[in-house]
Amino acid sequence: MASLSEPFIRRPVGTTLLAIGLFLVGAVAYNFLPVASIPSVDFPLIRVSASRPGADPTIMASTVAAPLERRLGEIAGVDQITSTSSLGSTNISMQFAIGRNID
């Protein structure tokens, strides 16, 4: 009973040519693959805005943004929360896991 490797051992030149051919086919196919240096990924993102007219940024951060961040952070699947407070307003961005459906 002949083994699977026997014909390749008996014909080393053919085996070498086959290996080179497979390598060349792979190299040519690799050039046709769509590759981006920075892939375009759309993260599920929700933005929340809150306003308190006349409040300075430190008041907005401590009395509005911080409590909202704590409560919004309890939502399942939230990966990252960032907030920006300015005069009279605060903006909070919540980023979810890529596979999460936020609709």
Image (tube, rainbow, N blue to C red):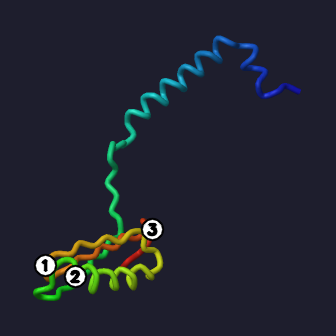
Look at the numbered discs 2 and 1 and tell me whether their residues touch, using CB distance below 8 Å: yes
Q: Name the mark on residue 99.
A: 3
Element type where label 1 sits in the image: loop
Element type where label 3 sits in the image: loop
Q: Name the mark on residue 60.
A: 2
The label nearer to you, 1 versus 3, is 1
Q: Nearer the viewer, residue 46 or 51?
A: 51
Task: Give the mark nearer the N terminus: 1 vs 3.
Answer: 1
Task: Give the mark nearer the N terminus: 2 vs 1.
Answer: 2
Query: Where in the figure is residue 58, as x and y percent of width and height?
Result: 22, 78
How busy is the neighbourhood of tag 1: few (under 14 within 10 Å), some, or many (20 plus)? some
Name the residue: 36% across, 42% down: 35
**Residue under pointer 1:** 87
Amino acid type shown at disc 2: Met
Amino acid type shown at disc 3: Gly
The label nearer to you, 3 versus 2, is 2
Quadrant of the image containing the C terminus: bottom left
The vertical placement of 95 against 28, above or below, is below
